[in-house]
């Protein structure tokens, strides 16, 4: 969906480096999510945020951090503590509580140099 | 927590034939079941969904069935076409907060190949 913009499309991380993935949405959605996708494992939830200044850990939060200072922005930082960061990262949003299908961004592919 | 299993992991069918992908879930409280199609390197896109108060839903060549008692749901694609080739994911929702927001737990995906 054109309403969720992820950048960059490709990102390379050096050893010991933190990198930040951007996710911006203009859909006026309250809830935002970060997923990690590895081959053969589907999508796994890293962090989610229901409202500004609030966020919660998902299933695989170790080595990641997030912030939600604005409704439209939910950046994800992959820290040096994440030893296996190579994956496809997808940001998603949902309008509000209820049975809303999640809208996904185009994703960021992160690789280790 | 919720666990979703999806089978088969790969599926090849002749163009024009039907394809069926099956998923099971563990949380009996799950109440919303979407299916996504993902082409290589692209975002998942919702193709059909079903809520727990419905047993079957159809949209042109695509249909989904839900058996709440057995906790399984299936995607059916009829008259398959080459553009149906992609990875398909099932998912099930569970409530994750007092605000009522849902978390989607995904299956591991099925790579569908349509043979011309």
Image: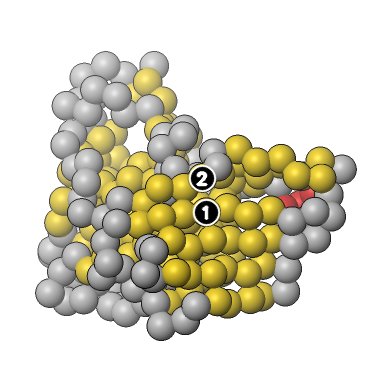
Q: Is residue A80 left or right of residue A29?
A: left
Instruction: Please state the chain letter of the residue tagged with numbered disc 2 in the rendered image.
Output: B
Name the residue at 75% across, 44% down.
B13
> Which quadrant would residue B104 be assigned to in this image?
bottom left
Q: Check whether the beta carbons of the residues at disc 2 and disc 1 lie within 8 A of each other.
A: yes
Question: Where the C terminus of chain A falls, by quadrant?
Answer: top left
Q: Secondary structure at mark 1?
A: strand
Q: Nearer the viewer, residue B11 or B49?
A: B11
Mark 2 neighbour class, 10 Å CA radius: few under 14, some 14 to 19, many 20 or more: some
Name the residue at 13% across, 64% down.
A53
Name the residue at 67% across, 67% down.
B62
Q: Secondary structure at mark 2?
A: strand
Name the residue at 25% across, 47% down.
A46
Which residue is label 1 attached to?
A: B22
Q: In the rendering, at what x and y percent does residue A79 appear? A: 20, 32
Q: Nearer the viewer, residue B92 or B39?
A: B92
Q: How many marks?
A: 2
Q: Are marks 2 and 1 on the same chain?
A: yes
| In the rendered image, the vertical position of residue B19 relative to residue B58, given as above or below | above
Which residue is label 2 attached to?
A: B7
| In the rendered image, the vertical position of residue A86 relative to residue A57, given as above or below | above
Q: Nearer the viewer, residue A40 or A33?
A: A40
Q: Is residue A69 left or right of residue B24?
A: left
The residue sitting at the right extreme is B116
């Amino acid at each position: 969906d054109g309403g969720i913009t992820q950048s960059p499309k490709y990102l390379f991380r050096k050893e010991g480096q933190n990198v930040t993935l951007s996710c911006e949405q203009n859909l006026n959605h309250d809830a935002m999510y970060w997923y990690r996708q590895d081959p053969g494992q589907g999508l796994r939830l890293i962090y989610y945020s229901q409202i500004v200044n609030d966020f919660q850990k998902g299933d695989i939060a170790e080595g990641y951090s997030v912030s939600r200072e604005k409704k439209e922005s939910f950046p994800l930082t992959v820290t040096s503590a994440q030893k296996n960061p190579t994956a496809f990262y997808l940001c998603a949003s949902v309008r509000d509580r209820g049975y809303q299908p999640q809208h996904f961004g185009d994703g960021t592919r992160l690789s280790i140099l | 927590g919720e666990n979703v299993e999806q089978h088969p992991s790969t599926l090849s069918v002749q163009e024009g034939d039907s394809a069926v992908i099956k998923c099971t879930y563990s949380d009996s409280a799950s109440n919303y079941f979407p299916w996504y199609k993902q082409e290589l390197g692209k975002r998942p896109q919702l193709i059909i969904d079903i809520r727990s108060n419905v047993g079957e839903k159809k949209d042109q060549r695509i249909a989904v069935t839900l058996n709440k008692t057995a906790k399984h749901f299936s995607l059916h694609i009829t008259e398959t076409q080459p553009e149906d080739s992609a990875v398909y994911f099932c998912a099930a929702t569970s409530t994750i907060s007092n605000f009522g927001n849902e978390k989607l737990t995904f299956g591991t995906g099925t790579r569908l190949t349509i043979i011309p």
